[in-house]
Image (cartoon, rainbow, N blue to C red):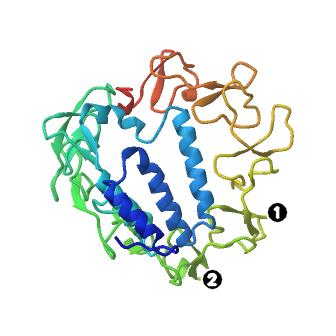
Amino acid sequence: MKRWNGNGGVLGVCALLLAACGGISQEDYSEKYNEALCHRKARCGQIRDEDACVREAREFARIQREAGMPPYWAYEGSFSSGRLRFDEDQAEACVERIRDSSCDQSLGEARDGDVCDFLVGQQKDGEPCLFFDECGPTSYCERTAVPVCAAGTCKPGVGLGQTLANVQQECAPGLIPVEGICQARPGEGGACSRDALCAEGLYCNSSTQTCQRLATEGAACGSGGGLCLPHLRCVEGSCRRLADVGEACTGGGCKEDLFCEKTTDSEPGRCRELHVLGEPCSDVYGLFTCRTNLVCGSDSRGAERTCRRPAEAGESCSGTECGLGNWCDRRTGTESCKPQGKLGEACDSYEWASCRQGLLCVDGTCQPGFPGTCES
């Protein structure tokens, strides 16, 4: 399997070993996908430090696991019941596609098609379901929103040119509803009224009301052209790579792992590296200046703001934020972090964040908020 790399045959050997092991397991997929995504971003000039990108993704995954929200936690019931299967070979193909994809494609376009459809529904039409993914590739799960845990039924998607009979119906894959009728997403040059109507890799030009391809490096942009791909910026009418350390940040700014440091709105500013743990920071002009997984905050005494780890349960959240799996109780007068409630545990009805992700506080108890929490 051929892939782009700068390390000779090392990645090729890894690919062969991976294939020999039968693809990528559900437990390993998230990390492998993030590695491929960081590689693509570095190769395309969207970030400058691939290794740091991978480290930060791994750290966030660790935080998620400790908070009880590992990858695909919402599908645990679907997997254990056999309503959903994880296709390891397809997962590997998806990772390879992301790693190898052209920089002239958006990420959505690179993932388009069925190559990244590694969650395989096992329910046939007419059988019960909680998620769309549990049904076959051309079907959907027709269900009402209330009650949350009431099972729906797998049904075939509505075909091209057919009308949706109710709000629970869905169009077949590749089709979108336009005024209640299932239609194909228009390609380049097709008529549109908003971006979501256009095919992947295209956007809706508000001036011409037609779908256009995102502009590649060197192409015209701005008033005389189109929108640039995410890893590019529009400078003097053409798409150029995002600015690196020390460069002026104009026309869309810096690489993702940098920030634009400026003192006034009238100055273009210069790109600099994000602050690390313990360094002074200031989230000015709506920009975050700390590295991923850190927050810019102060201690309870209001000391100088520095990049710090989010506060944990029992720690003060005055001037800072609580970590994943916790919420800031500001009603007690102490402003301290408390663990978010699990299913069936007590919660604060006045604080939406007092329950874990996917749960709602109802009459003082954490209750399912969407189907993925029904079988937790």
Vertical relation: 313 (above or below) 89: above
**Residue at the disc numbered 1:** 263
Residue 40 in the image, given as x and y percentages of width and height = 49, 67
**Residue at the disc numbered 2:** 236
- Residue 272 seen in the current view: yes
Vertical relation: 251 (above or below) 30: below
Residue 111 in the image, given as x and y percentages of width and height = 37, 62
Residue 54 in the image, given as x and y percentages of width and height = 56, 56
Name the residue at 28% across, 34% down. 130
Pointer 2 local density, CA inside 10 Å: few below 14, some 14–19, many at least 20: few
Dot 2 or dot 1: first in sequence order is: 2
Cα distance in 3D space between marks 2 and 1 = 23 Å
Q: Amino acid at mark 2?
A: Glu
Q: Quadrant of the C terminus?
A: top left
Residue 156 in the image, given as x and y percentages of width and height = 15, 46
Left/right placement of residue 156 relative to residue 247 reads left
